[in-house]
Image (tube, coloured by chain):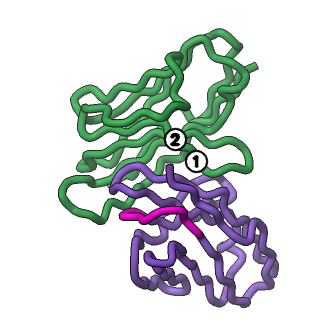
Chain colours: A green, B purple
Amino acid sequence: DTGVSQNPRHKITKRGQNVTFRCDPISEHNRLYWYRQTLGQGPEFLTYFQNEAQLEKSRLLSDRFSAERPKGSFSTLEIQRTEQGDSAMYLCASSLGGISSTDTQYFGPGTRLTVL
Amino acid sequence: GIQVEQSPPDLILQEGANSTLRCNFSDSVNNLQWFHQNPWGQLINLFYIPSGTKQNGRLSATTVATERYSLLYISSSQTTDSGVYFCAAGGGYQKVTFGTGTKLQVIP
Protein backbone atom coordinates (compact mmCIF):
# COMPACT_ATOMS: atom_id res chain seq x y z
CA ASP A 1 0.00 0.00 0.00
CA THR A 2 1.79 3.10 -1.25
CA GLY A 3 -1.02 5.52 -0.53
CA VAL A 4 -2.66 7.99 -2.90
CA SER A 5 -0.25 9.67 -5.29
CA GLN A 6 -0.74 12.81 -7.38
CA ASN A 7 1.27 14.26 -10.22
CA PRO A 8 2.57 16.81 -10.76
CA ARG A 9 3.01 18.23 -7.26
CA HIS A 10 3.27 21.77 -8.59
CA LYS A 11 2.11 23.35 -11.83
CA ILE A 12 2.61 26.92 -12.98
CA THR A 13 0.79 27.93 -16.13
CA LYS A 14 -0.27 31.01 -18.01
CA ARG A 15 -3.87 32.10 -18.19
CA GLY A 16 -5.68 30.45 -21.07
CA GLN A 17 -3.57 27.29 -21.12
CA ASN A 18 -4.93 23.81 -20.47
CA VAL A 19 -3.62 21.68 -17.61
CA THR A 20 -4.12 18.04 -16.62
CA PHE A 21 -3.53 16.43 -13.25
CA ARG A 22 -3.28 12.75 -12.45
CA CYS A 23 -4.33 10.82 -9.34
CA ASP A 24 -3.44 7.21 -8.57
CA PRO A 25 -5.63 5.87 -5.74
CA ILE A 26 -4.89 3.09 -3.32
CA SER A 27 -5.08 -0.01 -5.47
CA GLU A 28 -8.14 -1.78 -4.04
CA HIS A 29 -10.19 1.39 -3.55
CA ASN A 30 -13.37 1.72 -5.62
CA ARG A 31 -14.18 5.36 -4.88
CA LEU A 32 -12.14 8.33 -5.96
CA TYR A 33 -12.78 11.99 -5.09
CA TRP A 34 -11.48 15.34 -6.31
CA TYR A 35 -11.44 18.43 -4.09
CA ARG A 36 -10.14 21.96 -4.42
CA GLN A 37 -8.64 23.89 -1.53
CA THR A 38 -7.82 27.59 -1.42
CA LEU A 39 -5.78 29.33 1.26
CA GLY A 40 -7.46 29.38 4.65
CA GLN A 41 -10.41 27.26 3.55
CA GLY A 42 -11.39 23.64 3.89
CA PRO A 43 -11.37 21.39 0.83
CA GLU A 44 -14.38 21.83 -1.47
CA PHE A 45 -15.90 18.79 -3.15
CA LEU A 46 -15.63 18.75 -6.95
CA THR A 47 -16.60 15.27 -8.11
CA TYR A 48 -16.44 11.59 -7.27
CA PHE A 49 -16.24 8.24 -9.06
CA GLN A 50 -17.48 4.81 -8.13
CA ASN A 51 -15.17 2.63 -10.20
CA GLU A 52 -15.25 4.23 -13.67
CA ALA A 53 -18.63 5.95 -13.25
CA GLN A 54 -18.69 9.64 -12.38
CA LEU A 55 -21.64 9.76 -9.97
CA GLU A 56 -21.70 13.34 -8.76
CA LYS A 57 -20.35 16.69 -9.84
CA SER A 58 -20.37 19.92 -7.86
CA ARG A 59 -21.74 23.14 -9.32
CA LEU A 60 -18.17 24.40 -8.75
CA LEU A 61 -17.11 22.16 -11.63
CA SER A 62 -17.74 24.45 -14.58
CA ASP A 63 -17.71 23.19 -18.15
CA ARG A 64 -13.99 24.08 -18.33
CA PHE A 65 -13.34 21.22 -15.91
CA SER A 66 -13.53 17.56 -16.85
CA ALA A 67 -12.58 14.46 -14.93
CA GLU A 68 -12.20 10.88 -16.07
CA ARG A 69 -11.42 7.56 -14.49
CA PRO A 70 -10.90 5.08 -17.32
CA LYS A 71 -11.04 1.44 -16.26
CA GLY A 72 -11.71 2.47 -12.68
CA SER A 73 -8.06 2.92 -11.85
CA PHE A 74 -6.24 6.25 -12.05
CA SER A 75 -8.10 9.50 -12.64
CA THR A 76 -7.31 12.71 -14.51
CA LEU A 77 -8.66 16.20 -13.92
CA GLU A 78 -8.34 18.61 -16.83
CA ILE A 79 -8.88 22.35 -16.69
CA GLN A 80 -9.26 24.09 -20.03
CA ARG A 81 -8.59 27.79 -20.65
CA THR A 82 -7.28 28.32 -17.12
CA GLU A 83 -8.16 31.50 -15.23
CA GLN A 84 -6.37 33.12 -12.30
CA GLY A 85 -9.27 32.08 -10.07
CA ASP A 86 -8.37 28.44 -10.73
CA SER A 87 -5.20 28.83 -8.66
CA ALA A 88 -5.59 26.42 -5.75
CA MET A 89 -4.50 23.09 -4.33
CA TYR A 90 -6.25 20.20 -6.09
CA LEU A 91 -6.63 17.20 -3.82
CA CYS A 92 -7.49 13.64 -4.65
CA ALA A 93 -8.80 11.08 -2.17
CA SER A 94 -9.83 7.46 -2.40
CA SER A 95 -11.91 5.14 -0.26
CA LEU A 96 -12.71 1.48 -0.21
CA GLY A 97 -16.41 1.88 -1.00
CA GLY A 98 -18.47 -1.23 -1.40
CA ILE A 99 -21.21 -2.23 1.03
CA SER A 100 -19.29 -1.16 4.12
CA SER A 101 -20.72 1.90 5.77
CA THR A 102 -17.28 2.83 7.11
CA ASP A 103 -15.81 4.73 4.18
CA THR A 104 -12.69 6.51 5.35
CA GLN A 105 -11.16 8.82 2.75
CA TYR A 106 -7.39 8.81 2.24
CA PHE A 107 -5.88 11.89 0.66
CA GLY A 108 -2.97 12.38 -1.70
CA PRO A 109 -0.40 15.18 -1.28
CA GLY A 110 -2.20 17.45 -3.75
CA THR A 111 -1.24 19.38 -6.87
CA ARG A 112 -0.68 23.09 -6.34
CA LEU A 113 -1.76 25.07 -9.41
CA THR A 114 -0.66 28.65 -9.99
CA VAL A 115 -2.17 30.52 -12.93
CA LEU A 116 -0.22 33.62 -13.94
CA GLY B 1 -26.53 21.04 1.38
CA ILE B 2 -25.21 20.31 4.81
CA GLN B 3 -23.45 23.15 6.66
CA VAL B 4 -20.43 22.45 8.88
CA GLU B 5 -19.11 24.90 11.44
CA GLN B 6 -15.99 24.47 13.55
CA SER B 7 -14.80 26.24 16.66
CA PRO B 8 -12.56 27.76 17.74
CA PRO B 9 -10.98 28.98 14.49
CA ASP B 10 -7.58 29.38 16.13
CA LEU B 11 -6.03 27.80 19.20
CA ILE B 12 -2.62 28.20 20.82
CA LEU B 13 -1.57 25.64 23.42
CA GLN B 14 1.42 25.11 25.62
CA GLU B 15 2.95 21.70 25.07
CA GLY B 16 1.34 19.19 27.42
CA ALA B 17 -2.03 20.95 27.58
CA ASN B 18 -5.37 19.39 26.63
CA SER B 19 -7.91 20.81 24.18
CA THR B 20 -11.38 20.23 22.77
CA LEU B 21 -12.36 21.11 19.20
CA ARG B 22 -16.00 21.30 18.21
CA CYS B 23 -17.86 20.61 14.97
CA ASN B 24 -21.53 21.49 14.49
CA PHE B 25 -23.46 20.23 11.47
CA SER B 26 -26.83 21.32 10.17
CA ASP B 27 -28.47 17.99 9.28
CA SER B 28 -28.38 14.31 10.12
CA VAL B 29 -25.22 12.56 8.95
CA ASN B 30 -24.15 9.07 7.93
CA ASN B 31 -20.58 10.16 7.35
CA LEU B 32 -18.46 12.26 9.69
CA GLN B 33 -14.69 12.34 9.60
CA TRP B 34 -11.96 14.27 11.39
CA PHE B 35 -8.74 15.14 9.55
CA HIS B 36 -5.44 16.73 10.47
CA GLN B 37 -3.68 18.82 7.81
CA ASN B 38 -0.02 19.12 8.68
CA PRO B 39 2.07 22.22 7.90
CA TRP B 40 3.11 20.62 4.59
CA GLY B 41 -0.51 20.33 3.47
CA GLN B 42 -1.02 16.57 3.82
CA LEU B 43 -4.47 15.59 5.08
CA ILE B 44 -4.48 12.63 7.45
CA ASN B 45 -7.66 10.89 8.48
CA LEU B 46 -8.01 10.72 12.26
CA PHE B 47 -11.47 9.25 12.80
CA TYR B 48 -14.52 8.04 10.91
CA ILE B 49 -17.20 8.68 13.51
CA PRO B 50 -20.82 9.38 12.47
CA SER B 51 -21.88 8.43 16.01
CA GLY B 52 -20.42 7.25 19.28
CA THR B 53 -16.94 7.55 20.74
CA LYS B 54 -13.53 6.39 19.50
CA GLN B 55 -10.03 6.71 20.90
CA ASN B 56 -6.63 6.50 19.26
CA GLY B 57 -3.73 7.19 21.57
CA ARG B 58 -3.87 10.79 22.80
CA LEU B 59 -6.78 11.59 20.51
CA SER B 60 -10.42 10.76 21.00
CA ALA B 61 -13.64 11.82 19.33
CA THR B 62 -17.30 11.80 20.24
CA THR B 63 -20.25 12.43 17.93
CA VAL B 64 -23.72 13.08 19.33
CA ALA B 65 -25.72 12.64 16.16
CA THR B 66 -29.08 13.56 17.69
CA GLU B 67 -27.69 16.94 18.77
CA ARG B 68 -25.67 17.42 15.56
CA TYR B 69 -22.21 17.95 16.94
CA SER B 70 -18.88 16.20 17.23
CA LEU B 71 -15.94 16.84 19.54
CA LEU B 72 -12.26 16.05 19.05
CA TYR B 73 -10.16 15.80 22.21
CA ILE B 74 -6.39 16.19 22.16
CA SER B 75 -4.63 15.31 25.38
CA SER B 76 -1.02 16.03 26.38
CA SER B 77 -0.48 18.04 23.21
CA GLN B 78 2.83 17.90 21.37
CA THR B 79 4.39 20.29 18.87
CA THR B 80 3.74 17.71 16.15
CA ASP B 81 0.00 18.16 16.76
CA SER B 82 0.24 21.62 15.17
CA GLY B 83 -1.67 22.17 11.96
CA VAL B 84 -5.30 22.51 10.94
CA TYR B 85 -8.01 20.14 12.11
CA PHE B 86 -10.98 19.66 9.79
CA CYS B 87 -14.34 18.09 10.37
CA ALA B 88 -16.13 16.77 7.27
CA ALA B 89 -19.75 15.64 7.26
CA GLY B 90 -22.22 14.18 4.79
CA GLY B 91 -25.74 12.86 4.74
CA GLY B 92 -24.74 10.00 2.47
CA TYR B 93 -21.74 7.71 2.68
CA GLN B 94 -19.74 9.35 -0.10
CA LYS B 95 -19.71 13.12 -0.54
CA VAL B 96 -18.69 15.18 2.49
CA THR B 97 -18.63 18.90 3.22
CA PHE B 98 -15.62 20.24 5.10
CA GLY B 99 -15.71 22.90 7.77
CA THR B 100 -13.29 25.83 7.73
CA GLY B 101 -11.05 24.15 10.28
CA THR B 102 -9.38 24.88 13.61
CA LYS B 103 -5.78 26.04 13.32
CA LEU B 104 -3.80 24.67 16.26
CA GLN B 105 -0.36 25.84 17.29
CA VAL B 106 1.42 23.96 20.08
CA ILE B 107 4.34 25.87 21.53
CA PRO B 108 7.17 24.24 23.49
| Percent position of residue B106, x then y | 76, 76
- Nearer-N-terminus badge (2/1): 2
At 25% across and 46% down in the image, what residue appears?
Answer: A30
Residue B103 is a magenta residue: no
Q: As rendered, which of B18 and B1 lies closer to the eye?
A: B1
Q: What residue does disc 2 label?
A: A35
At 68% across and 84% down in the image, what residue appears?
Answer: B19
The residue carrying pointer 2 sits among few (fewer than 14), some (14 to 19) or many (20 or more) residues within 10 Å by Cα, namely: some
Q: Quadrant of the N terminus of chain A?
A: bottom left
- In this rendering, position of residue B86 left or right of residue A65: right
Q: Chain of mark 2?
A: A
| Percent position of residue B25, x then y | 54, 65
- In this rendering, position of residue B13 left or right of residue B51: right
Q: In terms of image quadrants, where is residue B31?
A: bottom left
The amino acid at mark 1 is Pro
Q: In terms of image quadrants, where is residue B100?
A: bottom right
Which portion, as a residue range, is magenta?
B24-31
Q: Chain of mark 1?
A: A
